[in-house]
Image (cartoon, rainbow, N blue to C red):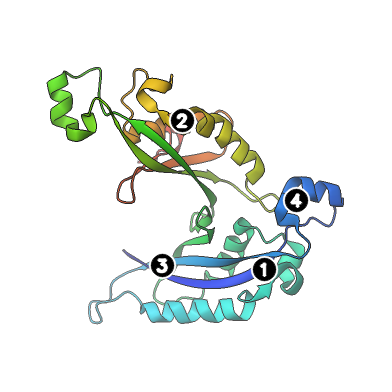
């Protein structure tokens, strides 16, 4: 089985509003997203399909066909639209990123010949994306940024072993990173809000449990969590996951971008699939 993807872009305007709620409640839940005049995004949609290789042609499916099918759908239904004023589905359902990716999935699922739709990932902006897979599960990822210093040094190894294993990252004075932290939750969007989790609440939890404790800190010297743990990015991902899981029951994984080239993620024992 081979997997291939194509990215397509579109723009749309929307507002978040539950007509069954009062103005005050809508404002309290959706904050700026409740602006009645709407706000807009340049969406990036990653479409991944899978199928078997055609030996004669050397391809599974022509990616230009994927682009054409997806673009035709987007141009007709979503691109350039004020979604909750012009689109029948989103007049009834709040056009959150989660609801959008699920609607796009339902619309495209049976459109491709010679392959099947495997995954959609919809980026609302650099810091927020929703994902739908053929497992019928919906995921939402929120990205956060923090700066921290660390030294890679294990108390279970000798100084010579640490230096050999970690090289200049074992510098006694430490070094630092601009970390990006991906927090991903999973579940069904709420019928009332269209969200898997209220982003305001998620931001508050991450601010309290992660940002206040670790941003602009030396992980080895300033934090209790890494007093006896070597703060590799693998360990950072695990520690952050365990801190957040207590407050976010539907947490799926935590990803750590140590640099643009180095990425690590931790799913927790309950999420691990062999």
Residue 225 seen: no
Q: Position of residue 66 (x, y in %)?
A: 43, 77
Query: Are the two marked residues, 2 and 1, in contact with CB atoms closer than 8 angstroms?
Result: no
Q: Position of residue 158 (x, y in %)?
A: 16, 18
In the displayed structure, would residue 179 be above or below residue 261?
A: above
Query: Where does label 2 land, which residue?
Result: 214
Q: Position of residue 252 (x, y in %)?
A: 49, 41
Rendered residue at 28%/72% (across/down): 53
Q: Secondary structure at mark 1?
A: strand
Foreground pick, 250 / 232: 232
Q: How many marks?
A: 4
Q: Identify the mark at residue 13; answer none if there is no mark.
A: 1
Query: Where does label 4 land, which residue?
Result: 192
Foreground pick, 251 / 34: 34
Q: Secondary structure at mark 3?
A: strand
Q: CA distance from mark 2 to mark 1?
A: 36 Å
| Marks 2 and 1, the one that precedes in the sequence | 1
Query: Where does label 3 land, which residue?
Result: 49
**Image-based side of 130 in relation to 149, left or right:** right
| Marks 3 and 1, the one that precedes in the sequence | 1
In the displayed structure, would residue 130 be above or below residue 146?
A: below
Foreground pick, 242 / 256: 256
């Amino acid at each position: 089985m081979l997997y291939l993807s194509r990215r397509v872009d579109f723009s749309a305007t929307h507002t978040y509003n539950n007509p069954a709620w009062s103005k005050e409640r809508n404002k309290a839940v959706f904050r700026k997203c409740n602006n009645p005049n709407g706000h807009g995004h340049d969406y990036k949609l990653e479409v991944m399909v899978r199928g078997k290789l055609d030996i004669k042609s050397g391809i599974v499916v022509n990616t230009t066909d994927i682009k054409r099918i997806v673009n035709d759908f987007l141009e007709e239904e979503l691109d350039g639209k004020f979604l909750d004023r012009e689109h029948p589905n989103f007049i009834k359902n709040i056009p959150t990123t989660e609801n959008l990716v699920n609607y796009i999935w339902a619309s495209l699922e049976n459109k491709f010949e010679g392959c099947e739709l495997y995954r959609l990932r919809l980026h609302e902006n650099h810091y927020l994306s929703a994902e739908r897979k053929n497992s019928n599960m919906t995921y939402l990822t929120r990205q956060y940024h923090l700066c921290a210093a660390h030294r890679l040094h294990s108390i279970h190894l000798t100084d010579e072993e640490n230096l050999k294993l970690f090289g200049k990252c074992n510098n006694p004075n430490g070094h630092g990173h601009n970390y990006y932290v991906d927090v991903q939750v999973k579940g069904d969007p709420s019928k009332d809000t269209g969200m898997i989790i209220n982003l305001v609440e998620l931001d508050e939890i991450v601010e309290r449990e992660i940002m206040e404790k670790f941003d602009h800190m030396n992980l080895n010297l300033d934090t209790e969590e890494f007093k006896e743990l070597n703060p590799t990015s693998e360990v950072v991902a695990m520690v952050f996951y365990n801190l957040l899981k207590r407050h976010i029951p539907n947490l799926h994984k935590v990803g750590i971008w140590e640099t643009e080239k180095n990425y690590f993620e931790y799913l927790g024992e309950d999420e691990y699939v062999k």
